[in-house]
């Protein structure tokens, strides 16, 4: 069982370029999340979704967009990349039960130059 | 709102030393509590959890007890190894309709041989 799969693992973007970070889960989880982790820092929530067709902003949504057309996939779109978006991006999924934690992907390391 | 306060790091210990990483929380209701571990270059992995007061979570020699009276969930290990070097995150998830985990800021642990 794959769990949460993120692609690509690494990417270098030039300022102003756009890209989509892919995230897929095969656990039939309704809830999915995108976080960013800056060097030496904790996690900041970008966007989350509680089911197909439903998304909501987290703490740091500016510069990002998401969509959730299926239960399995939750892509994160970066428009007009900026150096401040250099970070490691983690996708996670969960059931809606409070006693269930998150399953995380292995991350995408993005550098904007 | 919900919050998690973790012992500030970094923490450096010698191999076979006793480890404690403090974690306290503020939450409405009766949250579930989690410890996640992040090894260098990897995503977060669930280390252990406890879902009600006085529960003890344990895994890989690590333990943490859910203390409702002191609102704490301290992580302990009797004899650390070099392979335990990682960043440790304490987190909570409310059982009252809040679908998101609230994370602490993380504690970087380095074990020297």
Image (cartoon, helix red, strand yellow):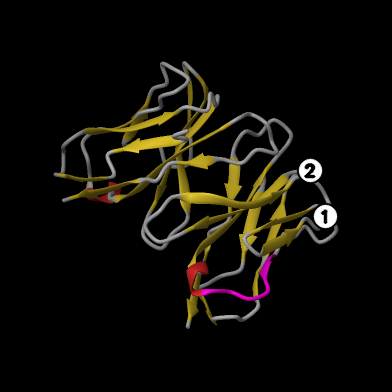
The lab-note entry on whether marks 2 and 1 share a chain reads yes
Quickly name the residue at label 2: B30
Residue depicted at 83% across the width and 50% down the height: B53
Most foreground residue, A59 or B90? B90
Q: Which mark is residue B68?
A: 1
Most foreground residue, A44 or B52? B52
Most foreground residue, A93 or B9? A93
**Farthest residue, direction front:** A1
Kindly tell me whether residue A62 is visible in this rendering. Answer: no
Please tell me whether residue A82 is drawn above or below residue A20 in the rendered image: below
Residue depicted at 68% across the width and 74% down the height: B78
Residue A16 location, x and y as percent?
16, 38
Residue depicted at 77% across the width and 57% down the height: B71
Is B84 situated left or right of B92 in this image?
A: left
Number of numbered callouts drawn: 2
Most foreground residue, B98 or B43? B43
Mark 2 and mark 1 residues within 8 Å of each other at the beta carbon: yes
Q: Chain of mark 2?
A: B
For the record, the magenta segment spans: B75-81
Please tell me whether residue B99 is drawn above or below residue A53 in the rendered image: below
B78 drawn magenta: yes
Please tell me whether residue B83 is drawn above or below residue B36 in the rendered image: below
């Amino acid at each position: 069982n794959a769990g949460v799969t993120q692609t690509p693992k690494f990417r270098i973007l030039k300022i102003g370029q756009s890209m989509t970070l892919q995230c897929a889960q095969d656990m039939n989880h309704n809830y999915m999340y995108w976080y960013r982790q800056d060097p030496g820092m904790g996690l900041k929530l970008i966007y989350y979704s509680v089911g197909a067709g439903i998304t909501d902003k987290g703490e740091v949504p500016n510069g990002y967009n998401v969509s959730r057309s299926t239960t399995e996939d939750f892509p994160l779109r970066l428009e007009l990349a900026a150096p401040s978006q250099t970070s490691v991006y983690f996708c996670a999924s969960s059931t809606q039960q409070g006693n269930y934690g998150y399953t995380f992907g292995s991350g995408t390391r993005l550098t904007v130059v | 709102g919900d919050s998690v306060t973790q012992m500030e790091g970094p923490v450096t210990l010698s191999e076979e030393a006793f480890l404690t990483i403090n974690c306290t929380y503020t939450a409405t209701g009766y949250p579930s509590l989690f410890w996640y571990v992040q090894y260098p270059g990897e995503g977060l992995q669930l280390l252990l959890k406890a879902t009600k007061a006085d529960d003890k979570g344990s895994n890989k020699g690590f333990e943490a007890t859910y203390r409702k009276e002191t609102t704490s969930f301290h992580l302990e290990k009797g004899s650390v190894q070099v392979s335990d070097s990682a960043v440790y995150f304490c987190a909570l998830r409310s059982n009252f309709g809040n679908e998101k985990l609230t994370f602490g800021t993380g504690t970087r642990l380095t074990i020297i041989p």
